[in-house]
Amino acid sequence: MHSSDFGKDFLWGVATAAAQIEGAANTHGKGPSIWDTFSKRSGKIKKGHHPTEACDFYHRYQEDVSLVKALGFTVFRFSIAWSRIFPLGNGALNNEGVLFYHHVIDECLQQGLVPMVTLYHWDLPEALSKEGGWTAYAINSVFNDYVLFCAKEYGEKVKHWIVINEPFGFTSLGYMLGVHAPGQTGVHNFFDAALHTAIAQADGAKILRAEVKDAIIGTAFSCSEIIPYTQSSQDLTAAKRVDVLMNRFFLEPVLGMGFPTADWEVLEKFSISHSTWRHQERMKFDFDFVGVQNYFPLVIKYNAFIPVVQAWEVKAKNRKVPHTAMGWEINADSFYRIIKQFAAYPQVKNIIVTENGAAFHDKVIDGKIDDPERTEYFKAYLAEMLKAKNEGVNITGYLAWTLMDNFEWAEGYQARFGIVHNDFKTQQRTIKQSGYWWQEFLSK
Ligand code: NOJ
């Protein structure tokens, strides 16, 4: 398998996110984000880590963009930290923050890389969180102001946009389970946040369409193939509920199908209480690409003790199947199947895999960062993606997660996903063997 097997216009990139790499959390007028404040709460992040310095990308972006180029990628995906532009979320503008993203974009363009910009990758300005954050409808107008600003400011130079990263990820982890910022819990908060996010996703896309000439607009969904533990009717329906929640709940409103209420009665109640039908048109947008982000499948078993969803994940290690350092099952076939599941919607006309990758406990052997498992992971997942593509799925790009080891949210700095190693004490970058594998792969 060579990269040329995917066609000459195929987009190959690496994906990153502001809060995970930038650092400079209090530098040059940046306002605090919910991750800055959440990480100060004791016990929330492993080892008490925080994103204050991260990879110091803020000061080292030139070196890092050069690395992306040197490895042979053509796309660099990064996100804009909302509170670097508007420290309080709206109102006063921080010119130094605005300038920083111009510098990053210009660096990409000078090096011949396509900048792909994510507008929201989980780092809500803290000031907005105090007003309810994603649970408050007021978020929608300020989000739109922020998008409008970015579109006007950067739209001449940036054509590839991702409106929101993994809406299910941050609304469930941050507003229902409380394990991510802002640490809220409860089904109500989740549903409120989900509705406003679904609206923001389409509103943001419409603003980009109106403002940016030749924009290529996408949004990025987390997804996992859901496999029932047994064929019992209880396990089958539990698996179906999880599929509704994780894979369909955010995608289908965008496609004009509304929330998938027919397949799960709890959603019916949510839909009635929020009159979601009123927003059906507003949540719809004809995206130029759908970003698919997949890491692992989930095996699901019925469990009456789990509130609402009544389902339980049977972990990979308990099933004794290969898994990453995160405990995530390595299963490339299931990547193929979830791509097919998304591609089966006639409205999905183009897929870009906007994230895929793995964390391992990398070893240093003779001064080299040896990570054969990561290379094998990429090879296997790429082969399955190629199979889907050869069967006719319109996949036009793939972005590896991620350029370098970084702040992995509640896992802190311990979970290493990079194809470049980062020493967080010295900020020294060292290309891992998997990075060299990518360089070789992309050269052919
Ligand atoms: C999804 C998220 O978008 C990204 O921020 C995260 O680091 C990776 N998955 C790995 O967990």
Image (spheres, rainbow, N blue to C red):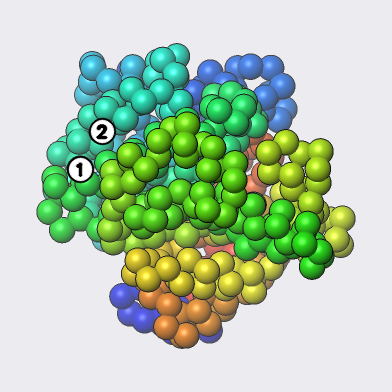
Residue 327 image offset from top left, x and y in percent: 75, 52
Residue 26 locus on image (x, y percent): 42, 19
**How packed is label 1: few (under 14 Cα within 10 Å), some, or many (20 or more)?**
some
Report the front residue among 407 and 286: 286
- The kind of secondary structure element at disc 2 is helix
Q: In the image, is the residue at mark 2 within 8 Å of ligand 1 by its beta carbon?
A: no
Q: Which residue is mark 2?
A: 144
Query: Residue at the spot x=23%, y=16% of the render?
Result: 92
Q: Which residue is pictured at 45% across the width and 14% down the height?
A: 130
Q: Amino acid at mark 1?
A: Ile
User: Is residue 177 visible to the viewer in this orientation of the structure?
Assistant: yes
In the image, which disc is placed on residue 399? Answer: none
Against 331, is 367 above or below? Answer: above
Q: Is residue 110 left or right of residue 304?
A: left
Does residue 108 sit above or below 408 in this rendering? below
How far from the left and from the top, in percent, is residue 285? 29, 53
Report the amino acid beneath label 2: Asn
At x 58%, y 37%, the residue is 172
Task: Indicate the quadrant containing the C terminus: top left, top right, bottom left or bottom right.
Answer: bottom left
